[in-house]
Image: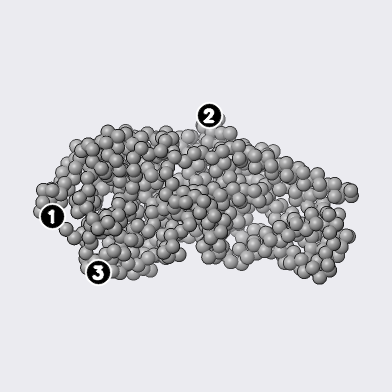
Amino acid sequence: MEKAVIDKGLKVFENGGDAKLITHLNSCVHCGLCAESCIYYKATGDDRFIPARKVEIVASVYRRYHTFAGRFLPALVKARELNEDTANEMVDLLFGACTMCGRCTMHCSIGVDIAYLVKTGRTMLSEMGMVPASLQSTVKAAVETGNNMGIPAAEFVDTLKWMEDELTDELNTKEAKIPIDVKGKKVLYTLNPREPKFFPLSISAMAKIFYAARESWTLSSRMYDITNYAYFSGNNDEARLIAKRMWDEMDQLECSTLVLAECGHGTRALRWESPNYLKKPFPFRVKTSVELIAEYIHDGKIRLDNEKFKEAVTLHDPCNLVRNGGVCMEQRYILQNFIGDFREMAPNGTDNYCCGGGGGQLAMSEYNERRMKTAGVKAEQIRRTGAKIVVSPCHNCVDQLTQINFAFKLNIQVKTMAELVADAIIL
Amino acid sequence: MTWFSLFFLISLLICLASLGYHLLFLLRSGQTPDFAPPSGNIRAGILYSFTGAMSPVKKESAFLHLPTYAAGMVYHLGTFISILLIFLLWADVVFPIALSLGIAAFLLASASCGTGILIKRSVKRNLRALSNPDDYISNTLVTVFQLLTALTLAFGSVFTPWLFVAAGLLLLYIPMGKLKHLLYFFAARCQLGLFFGRRGVWPPHKNQTP
Ligand code: SF4
Ligand code: SF4
């Protein structure tokens, strides 16, 4: 491996990093008590997947170049050179064996932000041009076409028109619309490109909710993609570019509130990271669709039929929305409003297990087999609830849960929150 | 001043200077500003990080490993007591016999916990793979320090030089490896409280089922 490439990776530690980075790089005491927090270790029992091993591979490189012991007595603290072997191992552990769910972080005996160090390691690999090809191609599609699935604008608009026709037919009114590129509306609503591509009914479901709440809203045909896979690839420049487009679109359309579709990592990348990518606070309001729906119910703007669903319903908490985003009670408030038999998973909320599809795993076909192995933990959780419907406010999770349903023969229905709510709405 | 007291004093100064440097470096590195508006209470998050989040009821690393957790707690308490005692012994403070023997017994127990942790690290495959020589050295130095404190309390001055030498070596070693966590532990809990507090994750919502 060329020195120039290694130097690029090491640049992430330039000047030793900021206080947060230095703290977490120096804090692990190798107690190993984080092992069971991680779905990779839980599902496989493979020592390599203990969260501390992911910390260690990043921290050992840091030690080699930035600590006294690492420089002069590397064997004492197992400090590692950044070379081809180390980098390849980093790719396998940090991209291939972590969803950055942060469950281990919460349970670490010291308080090491393990997911943050995994992200730091991913940034190093991104600087070195070592992002797995499948993940990088997803980022490339977003950068080049404006959405991670490369959907042409004409196809997108056609899908929206088709969904609008369906909606007006269903509701028997021309008032129920899916507005596109309308300036000056209150809400700019975002989408996960999976929706127009594979699940267009979730778009009409949200449109139905907006209609019922008499919301002033629009979609953009230019920039609707809430996702930002560059957050997972660790490429901050690409992440910044993608985030900026959404900020610019808010400006163009003169909307006052950006409403984030049901997408955990998209929410994280936009709500929590985009101001930092752009180094300024939001000039507009940001809200998740889950928070908005909860607000509609609370304010009496929509009413739900609590007789609609007789089956037991359980909730999967997306890690990025809940543990890493703090949106935890709103989805429960919504469900308790109209679901008679709502059953929590154990554990749940901020302590939930990742479905296995986060951290860009669904985009990285290289690790499909491993991903589906980790899914066993979630499958077992769902099975234990006995629920027939699993709702999750994240399209990425819904995708993984759908695969889990098939692979583990759970015989469940998997729905987004908007789909469930739209089905029960009283007009 | 005896030679061993002098050695202890020099080691202490080197240790404090070195830890001071780490602390200064950490503070001077600064916190990257977070431009995202908070949705929670940062102070409450940091407070929770040091309190509720550490409780064995909440922390899986504790409640799934209760014997190790308990051993770790006793071991750390033993270390704090030993540190306090060495300064008192240095100042020639004399304890009543019963008290000396009581503390010595506790320190014997805490040193046993340290030995247990060391054995666990040596025996368990996954821990061995995670460990480096520093882990074993740190564990050994702290355990020996506790043991010698106990022996000094129980049997008097015959062990005093040994205790001060062990303490001096430990102090010299602290800035080298994982024992620095006596500083970074607090920084890590602050950082974690800041992160989860800001995002409204900590303190947890009241009606969330654990
Ligand atoms: S962030 Fe999640 S997937 Fe990654 S090591 Fe921690 S628990 Fe495992
Ligand atoms: S629980 Fe924390 S301190 Fe212990 S090994 Fe895991 S990451 Fe390191």
Residue at 61%, 51% (x, y): give it: B185
- Position of the C terminus of chain A, as image quadrant, is bottom left
Badge 2 and badge 1 in a common chain = yes
Cα gap from disc 1 to disc 3, whole angstroms:
23 Å
Instruction: Specify the quadrant of the image occupied by residue A141.
Output: top left
Residue ID for mark 3: A310
- Circle 1 Cα neighbour tier, 10 Å, few/some/many (<14 / 14–19 / ≥20): few
Q: Which mark is residue A4?
A: 2
Residue A62: x, y in percent? Answer: 59, 40
Crowdedness near tag 2: few (<14), some (14–19) or many (≥20) residues, C-alpha within 10 Å:
few
Q: Is A148 on the left-hand or right-hand side of A240?
A: left
Q: Earlier in the sequence, mark 2 or mark 3?
A: 2
Q: Are marks 2 and 1 in contact (CB under 8 Å)?
A: no
- The disc numbered 2 marks a residue on which chain? A
In this view, the mark in front (2 or 3): 3
Q: Amino acid at mark 3?
A: Lys
Q: Residue at x 30, y 54 (%)?
A: A295
